[in-house]
Amino acid sequence: MVDSAIGRVPAESRAAAPRPSTGSYSGIWLSRYEYYSSGRDATFTAVHHVVVLQHDDVLTVRSLPGSAASTMEIDLSIDGNVATGTWTERTAPEGYYRGAKYHGAIQLLVELTGTRMAGKWIGFGKSFDINSGPWELILQDRSTSKAAIEAYDRPPEL
């Protein structure tokens, strides 16, 4: 319903976007994504423990160095329940991809509990094709203390 005298929608008619129940996403999260390797004709899962730090509507996500042979980072902006940004991964120097650097875009939907984000990544592949796949972040610990970081600076148990 529009108030024709002033051409605007009354406040009671405007629906608010759902908001997560938590005020902050900072903490230790489990990052997991899938990718297809054309050279090996198989799908693989990469996992890292990551530290998420929130500053207003910006999230910085950095892998803990002991959680995987590769390093990964994500920079996101939050708008309601949608997190949009970019990712970068430096593969393991001795691994299949020999320390190659990959990067791309990512978009995640934040569950209302604020404990899981799930969505898709997109980026270029080893043969310069465009790849995509699922990516999720699952909250492990709301603390970013030195003790919490040390406790998760190891490969995730799956």
Image (spheres, rainbow, N blue to C red):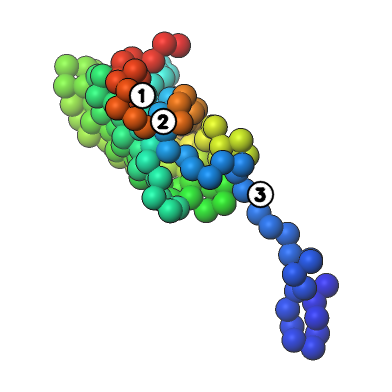
Q: Quadrant of the N terminus?
A: bottom right
Q: Earlier in the sequence, mark 2 or mark 3?
A: 3
Residue 143's disc number = 2
- Give how far apart the Cα atoms at labels 1 and 3 are: 30 Å
Q: Is residue 67 visible?
A: no
Q: Are marks 2 and 1 in contact (CB under 8 Å)?
A: yes
Where is residue 6, by image quadrant?
Answer: bottom right
Q: Which residue is the site of mark 1? A: 148
- Disc 3 is placed on an element classified as loop
Residue at the limit of the structure toward the top, as seen here: 157
Mark 1, other Cα within 10 Å: few <14 / some 14–19 / many ≥20:
some
Whole-percent x, y for residue 112 in the image? 63, 39
Left or right of 133 in this view: 98: left
x and y percentages locating residue 87 in the rendered image: 34, 40
Q: Residue furthest right?
A: 1
> Residues at badges 1 and 3 in contact (C-beta under 8 Å)?
no
**SS at circle 1:** helix
- In the image, 22: left or right of 37? right
Q: Is residue 135 above or below residue 57?
A: above
Asked if 94 appears above or below 120 in the picture, the reply is above
Marks 2 and 1 sit apart, C-alpha to C-alpha, by 6 Å
Q: Residue at x 33, y 14 (%)?
A: 155
Q: Which mark is residue 158?
A: none
* Whole-number angstrom distance, CA of label 2 to CA of label 3: 25 Å
**x, y percent for residue 46:** 37, 21
- Residue under the point 31% across and 34% down: 62
Considering only vertical position in the picture, is 39 above or below 85? above
Residue linked to disc 3: 18
The quarter of the rendered structure image containing the C terminus is top left
